[in-house]
Image (tube, grey):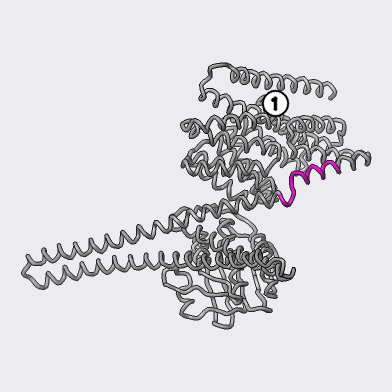
Amino acid sequence: MKYSIIILLILLSIQFAKADEATDKLEKLYKQDNLTNEKKVDLLFKLLVEYRNVLPMKGIDYARIGLEILEKEPRLDSLYRFRFINGIGDSYRYISRNEEAIDFYFKALRISEKSRKERDRAIALNNIGLIYNNIKDFNLALDYIKRSFRIFRQYNEKPLIIQSYNNLASIYWNDKQIDSALKYYNLAFEVSKEINDLVGLLHSYNNLGVVYLGKGENYTALEFFYRSLEISQNLKDRKGEAETLNNLGQVFISLEKYNTAASNIEDALSIAQELNAKAIIADSYFYLSKLYENTSNYKAALSYSKLFNSTKDSIYNVEQNRRIQKLHEEYMLQKKDNEIQILQRDKEITQILTIGAVSLAILLIFIAILLFSKYRSKRKTNEILTELNKQLNDSNSQLHEINLTKDKIFTIIAHDLKNPLSGFKNITTVLVDYYNDMSQEEIKESLATIKDASNNLMLLLENLLTWAKLQKNEIEIYPEKFAINYLVKKYIDHYKPKANSKNIDIVYNNGQEVYAYGDPNLLSIVIKNLVSNAIKYSKADSKIVVDVQNIDSKANFTITDKGIGIDKVMLKDIFDIGKGKDSRFGTEGERGTGIGLILSKSFIEMNDGEIWIESEEGEGTTVSFSIPAKH
């Protein structure tokens, strides 16, 4: 083993020397005289990429020089700005500076959306998802990665598809969804082998090693990690090499080969410190603490434990994560503003089409009258007129229905968005102007009002955006087997503060595990809307009962409240947005639009299920749905 370590160190020094040789060559080329701006920018981008795994901050310095040149060269700007901005984000991510990384990734996303380059957009979405995975916001991570995966699949670029498979697996693994993680790890591995993609194989070997290590199959894990180490050294991927050395250290700790474990982990720590890759540094400290604890060297174990905690805190702090999530909220608000503008343009187009259709109908009638005048048979003339009138009535009915739907949506946008925003303005004005005259309790109540209103507004905007996507057939379904209890409990816990503010008790009859077969993301929207509605329309000091069961090969969900109920007229058309129904207020003045129920019905039917409502006005409401329990 001693000689193996010496050989490994020699190989490492050779790899580092080759990396230095590559960067030296690029720097010499860059320093040449009489280079065109295009050549300079190209070399600066290559230096950014080359230094990403070696000295990320130095690569960022080169990128900033490149961005300065782009300010004067519009043609080069369109070719390179996205690559520089995205590359800076990659460099910050490699050293675990998540906040700076995601800021640049969102900038890259906006550039790609403006240029309408879908491949670039997919790369930015993928990288944003990686940051949310790093800070353990798995729902957002899955949302961004799946959106990027759909685009990569359209382009059929297998290296990018492999990357998506590995990223999806990593999210599921971190979220303890082991079966889903294994599914995507194996998909990534198979495609990597098919096209001999070394980067994909590097990650697949490492990921599969982690899986087998978790299952206690140490020697199988060891085999995968050694394959990963060999590829990372050949590719000069020092970050991947450090991660693999840490993983080897874990295996040797399990095998009680502590000297070998220490050697691997210390090598990983040395590389990570040179890269300033804080997440890997934190892992090395943790494994060294664990190693010394196993060998009863408690002083060293405590020392490394303290180093681990301080390093982890510098990466994952609450304030930084809050700022990262705020970037998502700002991006989504901007995106929803754009969607609203598109809806407004759609309404104008609909009006133009309506005028055109009516004009065309008038012209058709005029032509028909001219034709009818040629016939002497009154009966034949009447038959033709009757048929034309029927077609015209059908067209008018369809146009009327379209206008009702559009008018309903824009009524919601004009009224239900305007009122909360006006409320925000009034409350914040009072807070700014009279802050010193208000008690702490009054300030706290005002802030609670703002928080509650913002949550309701965000749910409304999300539902509007989802509804718009549904109308354009942009919603895709990815069914899988999953425990629906997890989703139900998640959204009950999410809305408990709101229920507590109305002194509402949510009783969840959660017995054995209940499995369903469907798209968990779409069903999340359904459950979130149904729980939110039950709280919104429940009376204070009442009770909501939630029940989930497997019955007759189906997953059945039921939520019952003792709220204001629904009258029979409204209940008849409750799932139809085009019937001109008025919005309803909750028991504490909360605004309701009905869009949540319409989305719920659509998504339940997309998952081969059905949804129904039983209600009596003034007595309460029961909403139920069922979907298949297996494929």
Residue 561 spot, x, y in % from top left: 62, 76
- Residue 448 lies left or right of residue 615; in this view the side is right
Residue 571 highlighted magenta (yes or no): no
Write the start and end of the magenta stretch as one range: 305-319
The answer to whether residue 306 is magenta is: yes
Q: Residue at x 48, y 64 (%)?
A: 413
Taking 30 as reference, is 267 above or below it?
A: below
> Residue 278, image x and y in percent?
75, 38
Which quadrant, please, contains the C terminus?
A: bottom right
Query: Which quadrant of the view contains residue 264?
Result: top right
Of helix, strand and loop, which one carries label 1? helix
Task: Name the residue furthest bottom.
Answer: 618
Query: Badge 1: few (under 14), some or many (20 or more) residues near its Cα, within 10 Å?
Result: some
Tell me where residue 274 sits by quadrant.
top right
Residue 97 appears in view: yes
> With 327 as the anchor, is 256 left or right in this view?
right
In the foreground, 610 or 416:
416
The residue identified by callout 1 is 233
Determine the residue positioned at 87% across, 31% down. Answer: 259
Q: Nearer the viewer, residue 23 or 205?
A: 23
| x and y, in percent, of residue 154 in the image | 48, 41
Closer to the camera in the image, 617 or 121: 121
Can see residue 552? Answer: no
> Can you say whether 134 is above or below 260 in the image?
below
The answer to whether 400 appears left or right of 127 in the picture is left
**Is the magenta region chiefly helix, strand or loop?**
helix
Q: Position of residue 200 (x, y in %)?
A: 62, 34
Give amino acid for label 1.
Answer: Gln
